[in-house]
Image: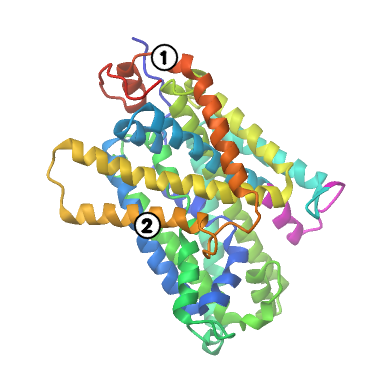
Amino acid sequence: MNPRPQLQKSISKIGFFSLAFGSMIGVGWLTGVKGWLENAGPGGAIVAFALGGALMLAIGFCYAKVMEMLPVSGGEVAYAYKAFGTGESFLIGWFLTFGYLSVSAFEAVSIGIVVSYLIPFDYWPLYVIDKTTVYLSHLLLAAGLTTLIAFVNFLGVGMATILQSILTLLLVVCTASFVIAGITNGSLANLEPMFGSAEGKAGLKGALAVFVTVPFWFVGFDTIPQAAEERTQRVSANKLGRVLLWSIVGATLFYAAVILSVAMVTPLANIQGEDLPTAAAFEEAFESPLLAQLVLVVALIGLLTSWNGFFLSGTRVLFAMGRGHVIHPAFGRPHARFGTPALAILFAGFITVAGAFLGKPAVLVLVNVGSVCISLAFLGVTLSLSVILRRSGKSISSMTWLLIGTAMTGSLLILLAMLIPGSPAAFPPNGSELPILATLSILGGVVWILSRRQRGSITEAERTRLILDEQGSDEPTTVE
């Protein structure tokens, strides 16, 4: 029997918190805050994020619970395999990989856009996609930073999480600076109307419109389970679950603080039509381009932490599927010296750079589809945990089942909110999202068929050992 491939074990509690929190924050809040205030007012938006954070805590509880039982690489891939078998494991892993790497590609495009607001950076136009120019300077920056992130991840997960921790600390310090400036120097009068918009939209309806979109601003806490196997000996699986839940609390407080500070510094009407309303609000209120640039620096740091987190997570999903021979086993072979998933890192880097060439309009569509993929993983975790607990034969408290039921219902509603036309979070009319989802599904079917030889090269008992690090039987878990 061949030894089970192992990754380097060097992620601390701080590293895990930075991985999750940094991945959640990202750069979307820089433009999103205007929509939150327009729809619900500052009070309604904060309430929506508080309730959304509570829902994400229920989903996070499911992750923490199942991660405590199965602290292995690949997270959702392993949970689905334990509960349902190889086919369902591939289904979740396929869509989850696309979800993570589409976000990574989006960050590669966004980095040039944010930098161009800080300094002149739009040089050497190459071509136009949907009225948006793609510049060579942006592509070179995207390729360079992708190479750097891939190289850091290749050298070791310890180095990648140290970088993540440093960037997250900078993110918190810089955010605190402009939030404190906004709250202490802003005006309570600017908070009116607290609920609903100045145009008279109903407070409840507006808050609901924000609430439906809230889960997408929390995507990223699920990066912790992907690397659970790489924790240091001093970090137990139980502690890891608590870190995951605290990262959700931290993200909730971050969004609430940003909403409050932006709302207090200037009336909403003063930032209408701005591409970057958060930065514009502080420049308008303080007549200080420097403070506006600080906001942009925070966004830049958030972009890098999100990019690194999702890049790392995508490689771990590929590694878990490769190690279990669900896809080609080469993806599951760690580098002999550095203990990192070398081929998965190269593949993730290639997809990220390729995505950057599509330009902002195309990648935004991919991110919308990626949100569906990651939300599908949320639902998969709640279903997997439910099945695993029922099979265990142990007595489970009614509170646990209530949280699982809440998370399952919430995950399903998140998916429906994106797929049902007319929903506040629905795909744009006549968009490319559904055709891309259909194409992705067909490609997944092709990869599944082509990987049949790899799956059949080992027994189910061996696959169980490789994916779950536990003994299994040779009973087939899926129809080949």
Q: Quadrant of the N terminus?
A: top left
Query: Where residue 463 sits in the image (x, y, percent)?
Result: 35, 20
Q: Residue furthest bottom?
A: 189
Q: Name the amino acid, label 2.
A: Gly
Q: Count residues near mark 2 (Cα–Cα under 10 Å), then give few for <14, some for 14-19, many for 20+.
A: many
Q: Position of residue 377 (x, y in %)?
A: 42, 44
In the displayed structure, would residue 305 be above or below residue 30?
Answer: above
Q: Amino acid at mark 1?
A: Gly
Q: CA distance from mark 1 to mark 2?
A: 37 Å
Kind of element beneath mark 2: helix
Residue 17, x across and y down, in percent: 42, 49
Would you say residue 13 is visible in this rendering?
no
The C terminus is located in which quarter?
top left
Give the number of the disc on residue 456: 1
Task: Write the start and end of the magenta stretch as one range.
Answer: 109-127
- Asked if marks 1 and 2 touch (Cβ < 8 Å), the reply is no
Q: In the picture, residue 467 is in which quadrant?
A: top left
Question: Dot 2 corresponds to which residue?
Answer: 410
Q: Quadrant of residue 249?
A: bottom left
Q: Residue at x 62, y 44 (%)?
A: 435
Q: Residue at x 28, y 40 (%)?
A: 68
Residue 64 in the image: above or below residue 256 = above
Q: Earlier in the sequence, mark 1 or mark 2?
A: 2
